[in-house]
């Protein structure tokens, strides 16, 4: 019975609600082996004692099943207090783990097609417009779209410290897998490789000093998103949705994802909120007000609504975000209002 064998057995213990195991999530901190006994130390990031008991029970059962001759399987689970877990909240010390990055904010959506990356791009440009120094990290490894939307495709340089130098587009420092591969080259990776890449994007990129690093998460709420949230010391998360019920249903999953990894929810943005026709009439193509209503039901801030403007789509396709192209126009005003509310939330 070796430490490798014990870890292999513990890989059968899944993190509750997810398909990944507690070993690959880095929760197993120590393994001690005696003649017929094993001691395991597991440290959680969520202040949930019931979750700790569930994982501990599953680990004990698995160890006894895998090693029938084992007389004692001692599993200790350390669960942080609410105060300790709250170190990821705005204004606390967790954010200082990445030198120079004052605030790290994730933008997420429960599903694709709601305009999450469009919001990330224009939110970064809006914060820059408000006088902040901003970086934009594209964490959608499989389908990076930020380089197209920001209008930059050149490969980043490497400095004397062997760190990637993020290019600057529209006043925003940008890093994306899309800058490192050819346009038609697919990324076929498993979860651990994605997690390692995100770690490198945070720690091996010369971000300099930033007021905000906006992290554009991939759509969905699966293992990759959980890994990203645990890899990057986030100050909070923003959920992007559209008004219809089909999107609001997965908003709840996005909120639950942030809660599971103890990331404070900064608010909800309702994208494609309505459309103003040329004659001035207002058309609510996807309904209206669902995002605000969901924020009220869940007791989280509503950061604002972004109407459906053709200029927003055109700017994304052209690599010229609408906030940068026409900062005084109505489409830009919607994103600037969201940026101001976000800034107020972060202090």
Image (cartoon, rainbow, N blue to C red):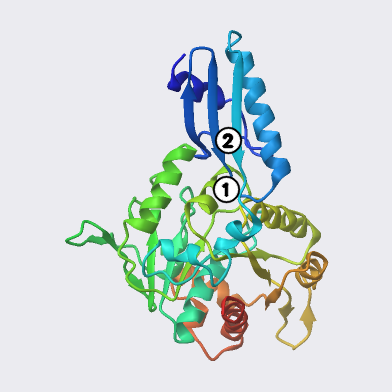
Q: How many marks?
A: 2
Quadrant of the image occupied by residue 186: top left
Q: In the current view of this chain or complex, which residue is farthest to the bottom?
A: 328
Q: Residue at (34%, 67%) from the top-left corner? A: 207
10 Å crowding of disc 2: few (<14), some (14-19), many (20+): many
* Left or right placement of residue 286 versus residue 26 in this view: right
* Left or right placement of residue 24 versus residue 101 in this view: right
Quadrant of the image occupied by residue 116: bottom right
Q: Nearer the viewer, residue 82 or 183?
A: 82
Label whose residue precedes the other's in the sequence (1 or 2): 2
Q: Position of residue 168 (x, y in %)?
A: 34, 72
76 shown above or below 292: above
146 shown above or below 64: below
Q: Residue at (42%, 40%) from the top-left corner? A: 193
Check disc 1 and report the residue beneath it.
Answer: 226
Q: Residue at (31%, 56%) from the top-left corner? A: 204
User: What SS does tag 1 mark?
Assistant: helix
Q: In the current view of this chain or complex, which residue is farthest to the left?
A: 160
Q: Position of residue 146 (x, y in %)?
A: 45, 63
Whole-angstrom CA distance, mark 1 to mark 2, is 10 Å
Q: Position of residue 222 (x, y in %)?
A: 61, 44
Q: Residue at (63%, 54%) from the top-left corner? A: 81
Check disc 2 and report the residue beneath it.
Answer: 20
Q: Position of residue 339 (x, y in %)?
A: 57, 79
Q: Nearer the viewer, residue 280 or 214?
A: 214
- Quadrant for the C terminus in the image: bottom right
User: Do callouts 1 and 2 mark residues in contact (Cβ within 8 Å)?
Assistant: yes
268 shown above or below 45: below
User: What SS does tag 2 mark?
Assistant: loop
Residue 136 seen in this snapshot: yes
10 Å crowding of disc 1: few (<14), some (14-19), many (20+): some
Residue 287 seen in this snapshot: no
């Amino acid at each position: 019975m070796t430490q490798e064998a014990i870890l292999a057995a513990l890989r059968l213990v899944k993190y509750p609600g997810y398909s990944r195991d507690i070993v690959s999530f880095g929760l197993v901190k120590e393994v001690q082996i005696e003649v017929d006994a094993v001691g395991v130390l597991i440290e959680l990031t969520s202040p949930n004692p019931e979750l700790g008991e569930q994982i501990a029970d599953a680990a004990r059962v698995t160890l006894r099943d895998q090693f029938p001759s084992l007389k004692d399987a001692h599993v200790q689970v350390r669960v942080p207090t609410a105060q300790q877990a709250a170190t990821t909240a705005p204004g606390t010390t967790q954010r200082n783990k990445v030198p120079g990055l004052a605030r790290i904010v994730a933008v997420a959506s429960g599903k694709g097609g709601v305009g999450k990356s469009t919001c990330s791009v224009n939110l970064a440009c809006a914060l820059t417009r408000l006088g902040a120094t901003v970086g934009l990290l594209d964490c959608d490894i499989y389908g990076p779209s930020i380089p197209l939307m920001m209008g930059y495709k050149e490969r980043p340089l490497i400095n004397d410290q062997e760190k990637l130098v993020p290019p600057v587009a529209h006043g925003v420092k940008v890093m994306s897998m899309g800058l490192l591969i050819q346009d038609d080259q697919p990324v076929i990776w498993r979860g651990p490789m994605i997690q390692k890449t995100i770690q490198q994007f945070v720690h091996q990129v010369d971000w300099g000093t930033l007021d905000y690093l906006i992290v554009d998460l991939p759509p969905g709420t699966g293992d990759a998103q959980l890994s990203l949230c645990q890899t990057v010391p986030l100050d909070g998360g923003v959920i992007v949705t559209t008004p219809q019920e089909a999107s609001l249903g997965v908003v709840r999953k996005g909120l639950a994802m942030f809660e599971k990894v103890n990331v404070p929810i900064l608010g909800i943005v309702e994208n494609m909120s309505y459309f103003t026709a040329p004659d001035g009439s207002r058309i609510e193509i996807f309904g209206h007000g669902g995002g605000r209503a969901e924020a009220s039901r869940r007791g989280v801030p509503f950061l604002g609504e972004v109407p459906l403007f053709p200029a927003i789509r055109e700017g994304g396709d052209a690599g010229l975000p609408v906030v940068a192209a026409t900062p005084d126009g109505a489409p830009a005003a919607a994103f600037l209002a969201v940026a101001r509310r976000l800034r107020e939330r972060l202090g």
